[in-house]
Image (cartoon, grey):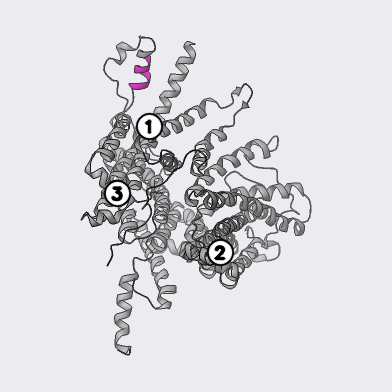
Amino acid sequence: MEQYFVDITLILDSTVRLAVPLILACLAGLYSERAGIVDIGLEGKLLAGAFAAAATSAVTGSAWLGLLAGIGAALMFSGIHGLASINFKGNQTISGVALNFLAAGLTTFLGQSWFKRGGYTPQLSGDQRFNPITLPFAEQLREVPILGQIYYELISGHNIITYVAFIAVPVTAWVLFRTRFGLRLRAVGENPKAIDTAGISVTRLRYQALIITAVLVGIGGAYLSIAQSAGFNNNMSAGRGYIALAALIFAKWRPGPALLVCLMFGFLDAVQFRIQGQVFPIIGEVPVQAIQALPYILTVILLAGFIGRAVAPKASGIPYTKER
Amino acid sequence: MTALPRWADVVLLPLLNVVLAFIVGGLIVLAVGQNPLQAVGIMLYGAFGYGSGFGYTLYYTTDFIFAGLAVSLAYHAGLFNIGPEGQAYVGGLGVILIGLALNGTHWAIVFPLMIICGGAFGALWAFVPGYLQAKRGSHVVITTILFNFIAASMMGFLISRVLKPEGVNSDESAPLEAITRVPQLRTFIELFKNSPVNLTFFLAIAALVFIYWLIWRTKFGYAVRALGKNPVAANYAGISNQKMIMIVMAMSGVLAAMVAVNNVGGVQGRLILNFVNGAGFVGIAVAFMGRGHPVGVGLSALLFGILYQGGQELAFQMPGITREMIVTIQALVILFTGAMGDMLRAPLARLLVRSDAPTGAK
């Protein structure tokens, strides 16, 4: 019994760690998609953010500067996306796909040119990373059965970005549903003409959404390279941007459910390591690949409308043209 | 939208966009302290300078023609198929299954069966997203992305757990016998020594011609284009949009799967983990750059073939530049010819209309 409890706590602990980049990227996507801009490019922004953060942190020795650089890189990518999809009224999906390749190509290319380590950045340590924070009284409460252990293992001992990610969820819900900006943001994604008629700039609002997207996904990228790991390696986002996109659809573009779905996908990721080679009663050995594919399969089933209906914001993906 | 003269719309604008992509790519190379012109020279030598290099260029071109046509065909029907990568991967399963079943049989019999069987597997993998789009309303862009990941997991499992023979360390299927493999051109033409270009290359050329005929010379092609331009109008004209979406996606999957015939049947002779290696994604760049027209697709596939083979050479000669620079170029091409394709339209129109004015009647 005791052992099971420890096991479960550990799995949940790594669930939290693995869910953080998903939560940040998912919330990031939520802002732009709610504003009517499809963001297939989350994956690329995540990767670019991770690279910029690790590279800057390696050179300057400061994780905070790394974080800023991560956000900066994501902002640049968002800027290109905005230019293509808002100003030139191009196809947002194509722009997003291009950004994903741009990130994959540039990060490895620049990484090799700058650091000559086959695309890896140097190993980071100490202040170059965001280290675990021990919350107050965690050590003292550690001996308290169950609750103390949960507090010590699960709630305390994460880095600051983890807490930021979890706080960002209620903040997003509040911004989206309780502020004037949130109302306008949702309106511009559903009916930009109404926003325009009310005398509010559609372009400006959509750029604002893209900026918030970049900040969040940039933090997510920094988490990958300078908080969760100690440095950047090739293609380290490994499809997380796409998983976040899937989670966003799964959560039907709402922040609360987005958190739950990201935690669920994080949990699947966490158990994947644990069940490797284990034989279960009745089902036998579960292949790792089956667990890996599960988030995608679930999203396909959801999209097909077999478990509820996922309806995107109405103006999603359509560039807005003022009548002339 | 200002109207451009037809020649400017068809030739000049796309060309300017591609040039723009390469200029930006050159600036990036310059920014890391390397000489872009020297890089281009090395790449051209690597792609054309010697026989086996040229053979490799044609081999890559074959892949990219199929992937580019797969994306183009779907795009004519208004469907953005991001899934050729997964469709080619699953197509490889069909190719290897028929190959292993008839292992030892002469290629003249197996080659057509590889096309059919691989094509069928690829078609199935593209048909499902098509079906889900047509009947259940889920967006084909998202579903094809998801299907790429599902294909990667499924094929990973099948290759490492099912197809891998006893006593083999790397993740790959049992090999095909030499007589069963699609013959490489070097067996007929001395020039292509050591390069993997094979008979599938001619299949690719045939596919270009076939797709041109299909899209612009048949009733079916008219329906495809009608669906892509205006689904509502197409519906009024009596075209069943749902049926068309499913058929076009399946055909797109067949084209993507031919990448597997080229690789599994013609080069490796076995199914290797991740053999597609991004060729499916290059198809997206090829399709946009070629504007979905077979002539354009053929030329852009050749350009990317040059980039991929030349990029190998580059990695040897200029260690400061990695092959990933090619992925960057690919991204810039998609960005400038696809997403920002109309960026130069307005300035160009102003320029051309002004210079035309004195000679015009008014």
Residue at left offset 24%, top offset 53%? A204
> Which range is magenta?
A149-156
**Residue B239, labelled with which disc?**
2
Query: Which label lies toward us, 1 or 2?
Result: 2
Residues at discs 3 and 1 both on one chain: yes
Q: Is residue B41 above or below residue B269?
A: below
The location of residue B39, given as percent across then percent down, is 43, 61
Residue flagged by tag 3: what amino acid is it?
Ala
Label 2 Cα crowd, 10 Å radius (few <14 / some 14-19 / many 20+): some
Q: Chain of mark 1?
A: A
| Mark before the other along the chain sequence, 3 or 1 | 3
- Mark 1 vs 2: CB contact within 8 A: no
Residue bearing the label numbered 3: A187
The location of residue B322, given as percent across then percent down, is 44, 51
Q: Nearer the viewer, residue B292 or A55?
A: B292
Residue B65, quarter of picture:
bottom right
Separation of marks 3 and 2 at Cα, in angstroms: 35 Å
Label 3 Cα crowd, 10 Å radius (few <14 / some 14-19 / many 20+): many
Query: Which label lies toward us, 3 or 1?
Result: 3
Element type where label 2 sits in the image: loop
Residue bearing the label numbered 1: A228
